[in-house]
Amino acid sequence: MPSFRATYITRPIHRWAKKALPALSDTEREALNAGDVWWEAELFSGNPNWDFLHAVKAPRLTDEEQAFIDGPCHELCAMIDDWTINHETADLPPHVWKFLRDAGFFGMIIPKSHGGLEFSAFAHSEVVRFISTRSVAVAVTVMVPNSLGPGELLHRFGTKAQQDYWLPRLADGRELPAFGLTSAEAGSDAGAMVDNGVVCMGKWDGQEVLGIRLNWAKRYITLSPVCTVLGLAFKLRDPDGLMGNTQEIGITCALVPTDLEGVETGRRHIPSSTMFMNGPTTGKDVFIPLEYIIGGPDYAGRGWMMLMNALAAGRGISLPSMGCAAIAFSAHTTGAYARIREQFRLPIGKFGGVQICMGKLAADAYAMDAARHLTCAGLDAGKSLSVISAIMKAHATYRMRDALNDAMDVHSGKAVIDGPSNYLLAFYRAVPIGITVEGANIVTRSLIIFGQGSIRAHPHMLDNMMALQEPDPQKSLEAFDKSIWAHIGHTTRTLFRAWGRALTGGRFAPAPDAAGATHIYRRLGRWSAAYALTADICFLTLGGALKRKEMISSRMGDILSEMYIISAALKRWDDEGRQQADLPVLTYAAEAGFQRIQSALDDVIVNLPARWAAWLLRGVTWPGRREKGPSDRLVEACSDLIYAPSPTRDRITGGVGGGCLHPGVSLLNDCYAQVNAMAPVMKRLRDARKSPQQGLEAGIVSDAEMQQITAMNDLVARVIAVDDFTPDELPRYFNDYSQNAQNRYDGGRGEFNPKEAAQ
């Protein structure tokens, strides 16, 4: 029998909640159920369990994975001329395509039992990060077959027959995949797609079989111009009931060989002047058997679920790896350039305005790579991290943009003038690509991170929603009575916890004994409690309307993201032995993050429609101006960490200064080493107020040292030089670009056949 509480207290709340919460669509339900909940749930709880975080095993490369980076990855980078790819041939050279196939780059996620490398998520991330520092075009070419696409979908959902046939062919490069999702009508709103398939009978290998007649028009499809098999998302219909009683089956994913009649590929887009293969594809009355549905006929109509689950993993690796590479690359090159370049007889790295950029670069490089490591650790533990992957994709690419802007500011004209020696501009051009693809950041930030995270990561919200969606009224009430009172108890505890920690600045919040970082744990616990309470108040006062309050949702997503990144930086500091020399960048990352959390929380409260709730939150959480951000002294200390050579600089930049090097970066590294080696000699001259020639005459420097100074100055001049072209070279350059691109495809025959060129 229903309890007194359920009958007289819960029932009115249940009726109100039923009206306040709109029914979930199928796509919303599948998105909510996609992926796993992990560390973000602890942050959402208001009282994170730090033991959980510290128990996560730090990712490590196996000997085989390390050998792949030391061998094939280095070999690949030695083959790449990014200027030629982007400005002359508009494609990777044929020998690079062949090497990518032969070395197994397209099969990193495919199991060894099917001929792949079966690398960990961390190894996959390290490979993409490594290649990105040399060429974005090549990195994208490698990342796409290993991210959302046929390989991932077949591995997760394919039938045994599909896996046995397709995976070995994808692993060794006999088949090159692409995945068609986006169309003119359906960008972020995949449910609006008009690409369709109709169940019907048709001819296949000379026999009449049950299959699907497809029509589609996709765009922005990476590798489409050269792919041999297209993974296709479309809406499946069965008007004649050939598969059952359901006519509108829904979004379905299938494999379409691109040599079938009616398939068109080959034309290209130019994505932000970065010349990886990307273009449209269309299909008209293309017939495939039902067995070409990924997963077989049983998975007809389950495409959205498949995509959401696959995206939860791939989105946490590929673009975050490229973003982290760009941030570390910016920190490495900017620190070195600021040491080499002088103005007013002083290295520009000693100017306060430059140090602002450099300090931020150092902290972001440290914190975002920490978040990358933590995310890979979760993925390698078997978790499908839908919310965390969204956090990583959005914020790694946002901070990539910030880092490159700062790097461009410091390099100034050196980075503005394009040419073979410019090592920043290719990354800079790629920023819009990272921010737009695999879920546009605006949608990810405003709808997914908090919209999905608030339900999945909250300890009780999903239970409440599932209870309200239960069609049986009595079962719905009983389940809701159990979940809502657990929720109320959680909110009550969180209210007092948030209030107490706000009063004390988190001084008594639980924290591990972490020496100089203990106070960061405590302050993060303080903001976690404030966040959890604010989330509950938003649910209470806005109900189902919360998903339409995208500005509030964006800010709440930003807070969850900042907490995740700060906690990852804390874990990195702990994993690396609590290096005291690294404490400034950890502190900067935390101080800047806390300031952003405070500002976002304050903006949420200011804009809450229910003013009584806003006053309650302000009185309990105190989101005032207590968080001041990094001090000038801290900014200068972090700037110095990437300005001068040290093990800390190497840890911050993650080793991007060695191995996969642009020729301009190799020259920069040589010059940086020489300038630092000659620093004592140059100090003697400055102290004596002598020029090098005067110092030689006065015996302050030796003949050998004078030769070293001359060699150093020559290197500096080469580093700060920029490319130029004669008036005659530019028209020829553009004409050659067009002609070379045509010759790449057809050998001058006047025929457009990119597949043949790629083969």
Image (cartoon, rainbow, N blue to C red):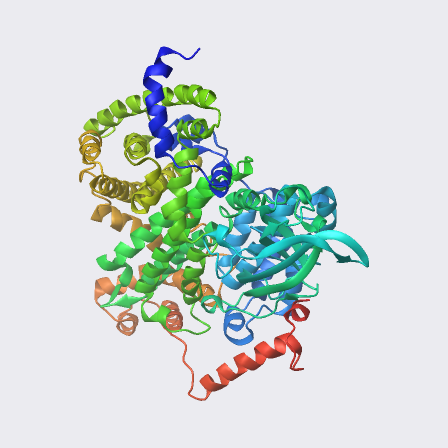
| One can see residue 574 in this view | no
Q: Give x and y (percent) for residue 535.
A: 31, 34
Compared to residue 620, the image places residue 442 above or below, namely below
Quadrant containing the N terminus in the rendered view: top left
Residue beneath the point at 47% across and 54% down: 322
**Residue 536 in view of the camera:** yes
Residue 530 appears at what percent x and percent y?
27, 32
Q: Of residues 692 and 366, which is closer to you in this image?
A: 366
Residue lying at the far front in this picture: please name it. 240
The C terminus lies in quadrant: bottom right
Instruction: Report the residue that reaches farthest toward the bottom.
Output: 728
Residue in view at x 48 percent, y 53 percent: 192
Please state which of residues 666 and 82 is positioned toward the viewer in this rendering: 82
Q: Name above or below for residue 364 compared with residue 689.
A: above
Residue at point 30%, 47% (across, down) = 551
Position of residue 349 measured from the top left corner of the image (x, y, whole percent):
28, 59
Asked if 717 appears above or below 306 in the picture, the reply is: below
Q: Residue 419, image x and y in percent? A: 44, 74
- Left or right: 44, with 596 as reference point: right
Snapshot quadrant of residue 432: bottom left
Tell which residue pokes out farthest to the right in this image. Answer: 206
Q: Nearer the viewer, residue 405 or 583?
A: 405
| Badge count | 0
* Relative side of 326 to 113, left or right: left
Left or right: where 284 falls relative to 461: right
